[in-house]
Amino acid sequence: MTISKGPQAFPRSEYLRRLAAVKSEMARRGVETLVVSFDRNMNYLAGYTARTAYVPQGLVVSMRQDEPTIILRLMDTYAAHYQTFLVREHVIGYPEALIGNAERDGYDAIIDFLQETGAASAGLGLELANLPPSAVDKFKARLPNINIADFSNVVTWIRTEKSDLEIAYMKEAAAITDAGIRRAAEVIRPGVWEADAAAEIVAALMRGTNGKHGTSVANFWMNTSPRIGASHFTWSEDVFREGSQINLEIAGVRHNYTVPISRTFSIGKPSERLRRVHEAQVNALDAALSVVSPGRTCHEVAEVIYGTLAKHGVEKESRCGYAIGIDWLESTASIRTGDMTQLKPNMTFHLHLGNWLDEDFGVMVSESIRVTESGVEVLTGTPRQLFEL
């Protein structure tokens, strides 16, 4: 018995639109065939979300065909049949003999396919930055007469301008993010184990809201006193205490589209330093939102943030945000000085005003936003406040 197609996150026309944008860039770079190996880009172009990138895999995009071909470990092809819009003939599995094999692996299966189909007869694009050096050497050795072009991050940049369908999922994810913060405000109390609170928050992110479930669990950061000078801790094996500060960063997920948020909680009266820095951050965030619009640059937004913080006597060393979308981070534009990326409608960012000022002191507040035709839309609805519990 064969597995049937599952519910598709997007219609076939949406994937063909994305592929057309990629093929346009391929033509500009003289690439006839592209092997996409970055799992988030495979997701973007075919709808494949299974967590299988720990073994070689690839999506072969050809200028000769409308649909790409996905090449996976045999046991993972069933997920591709279920999840992707691809016809069965465009899902190929390589045998288990290529797993844990020091001589031949899944990249050999991809190269075999390119040679057997003649797809490697002209320019070949590879996401070199996503491939291990041994795989790059293998492509070059086995395809010595083929011009290999570096396609690293090209598809990721194409992803920065979202379709309205993508934005709809991000709004659903944002509502789930808000539900997670609401649950956090309910369960963070003195005497409660951090792990128990984390379990409740994650459960809220999985249950979702408005009839829309969380379809995955994103990174989860919970930094509690005295660890609030760190930015990427999870929960500890301890309980919350009176006087504790908690810096929480979570994200709701819908079909891999991830919308993060950061908020700071204080059990009991916050310190004056905490209040002062948090107020500076909120003012800087408000100032940034007032200038975000098409045509502005990431640099300009960052300058407004840094300038506003400075007026409040607060310094920030780290960047002020980054592009978001599939699986939290898009490694493209950053809200930092010197990044002259021009903002365009339906670009999405996590504006992060986290400040880690000492080993034992940091404060967090952030918003996920969408650039609109005339300005900005904040995707989440959580109050921009310091939560006093």
Image (cartoon, grey):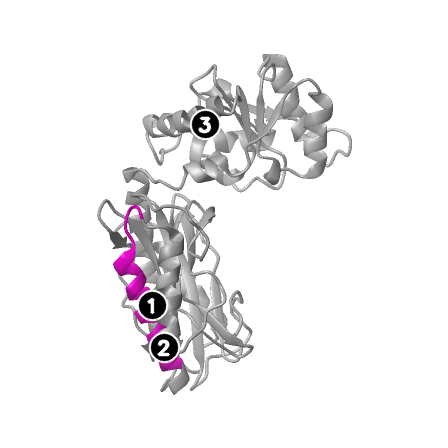
- Residue 312 disc label: 2
Q: Quadrant of residue 265?
A: bottom left
- Type of the residue with mark 1: Ala
Residue found 35% across the figure and 40% down from its top? 161
Work out whether 266 lies above or below 10.
below
Cα separation between marks 3 and 2:
45 Å
Residue found 69% across the figure and 20% down from its top? 143
Percent position of residue 353, x then y: 40, 66
Most distant residue in the left direction: 374
Which residue is disc 3 drawn over? 25
Helix, strand or loop under label 3: helix
Q: Are marks 3 and 1 in contact (CB under 8 Å)?
A: no
Cα separation between marks 2 and 1:
9 Å
Q: Nearer the viewer, residue 77 or 268?
A: 268
The mark that comes first in sequence, 3 or 1, is 3
The reply, left or right, for residue 130 in relation to residue 369 is right
Boundaries of the magenta span: 274-295
Q: Badge 1 local density, few (<14 within 10 Å), some, or many (20+)?
A: many
Work out whether 389 lies above or below 130.
below
| Res. 341 visible in picture | yes
Q: Are marks 2 and 1 in contact (CB under 8 Å)?
A: yes
Percent position of residue 388, x then y: 33, 80
Helix, strand or loop under label 1: helix
Cα separation between marks 3 and 1:
37 Å
